Amino acid sequence: MENPVSVNEGGVWGKNDSFTVELGFDLPVVGGTVSSVGFEPGYGFSFPTDAFYRLFLFHWPFGGSFLCDREHDGGASESPLDYEIVGSQGERIVKVQWENAGFRWDMDSVNWQGAVTPTFSDWIDFQFWFYEADGRIEIHFGPRSILNPDSYLEFNRGPWPIFWIRNYWMDLYGDPNNPSINWFDPWGSWNRGSFSGIPNEGTVLIFNPDFLVSTEPIEAFEDEVSVHWSRATQELLFDFKDTGESRGQVAIYSITGQTLFTGELSQNQRCIKVGHLPEGILIIKFIVNNRIITKQVLNSGIE
């Protein structure tokens, strides 16, 4: 960062600390916009909206944080928390940075399970970027030293990156450099997926907001639509199982969050010509009758 503003101002921070970062602009989120975010450095961020909206990164399923300050002898912070605002009005970006952040299980002298031996050696640098222009959020991973994998793989689960939006969670899991995505109801099913490690330095995870931004309630539903990508005709074929009404929007993303296609759906439409799409996993998002439906399809390059 060129002009960082300190968040913790030299103070040691832990799992229960919370700060406020003023964005300087209105960021579109579910239920409207926010001009500030709640910065919870052990977990991630909360957003002051009417909807319950949070973003967790280094987090494990039952409410615990992974991250902490690396100071352990009662001195000043060894893990600065900073932010800066760059760009001109209308194109500003707020960058929030963890530097030399430690992992709780590598710093605690005793943890409740007694399964991890602290080494006081592990750390990671990363940033969250919030964009004024389109509301997208990016996670940029920087240098790190991971000598004690138990420090982030407690219970062999690893980091649990999620958006928590009202009663549903958007869960990232699997390969941390090429993750899969799933929507689910956390109250009906715990112990969902997790990263199998930590993303490599230089990895950027991109969250496009257009399927999240709405002034109406949006809920997540699974198994309401079957989807097939036809490479031969370059069409997306789909069928809504429980309703004849398919009027709404559709968007297609790469696994890294790049927007590949957006379009409108007319009533009872069952296919849409989208043109060439890159090979690999594609994320298909429908918004129909204030419901969001997320599916994955594989464009293998073989028809």
Image: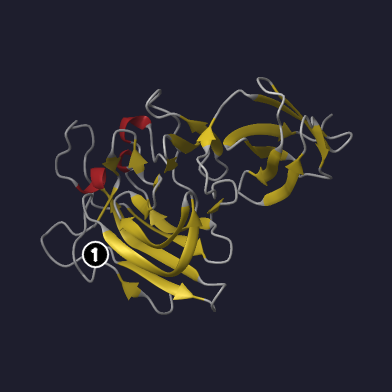
Task: Name the side, left or right, on which 181 lies relative to 9.
Answer: right
Foreground residue among 261 and 64: 261
Foreground residue among 165 and 160: 165
In the rendered image, the vertical position of residue 239 relative to residue 203, given as above or below: above
Quarter of the image with the C terminus in it: top right
Residue 289 drawn at (x, y percent)? 62, 35
- How packed mark 1 is, by other alpha carbons closer than 10 Å (few <14, some 14-19, many 20 or more), is some
In the rendered image, the vertical position of residue 301 relative to residue 51, given as above or below: above
Quarter of the image with the N terminus in it: bottom left
Residue at position x 83%, y 45% in the image: 276
Task: Name the side, left or right, on which 7 lies relative to 240.
Answer: left
* Residue topped by disc 1: 78
Residue 149 drawn at (x, y percent)? 35, 41
Residue 47 drawn at (x, y percent)? 38, 53
Q: Is residue 232 visible in this depiction of the protein?
A: yes
* Label total for image: 1
Residue at position x 65%, y 20% in the image: 242
Residue 288 drawn at (x, y percent)? 64, 35
Q: How is the image coloured?
A: secondary structure
Q: Quadrant of residue 64?
A: top left
In the rendered image, the vertical position of residue 293 relative to residue 98, given as above or below: above
Foreground residue among 259 and 158: 259
Amino acid at pointer 1: Glu
Q: Secondary structure at mark 1?
A: loop
Residue at position x 29%, y 33% in the image: 62
Q: Is residue 201 visible in this depiction of the protein?
A: no
Furthest toward the left, the residue is: 74
Residue at position x 75%, y 46% in the image: 263
In the rendered image, the vertical position of residue 113 relative to residue 90, given as above or below: above
Q: Quadrant of residue 162?
A: top left
Furthest toward the right, the residue is: 233
Task: Name the side, left or right, on which 267 lies relative to 204.
Answer: right
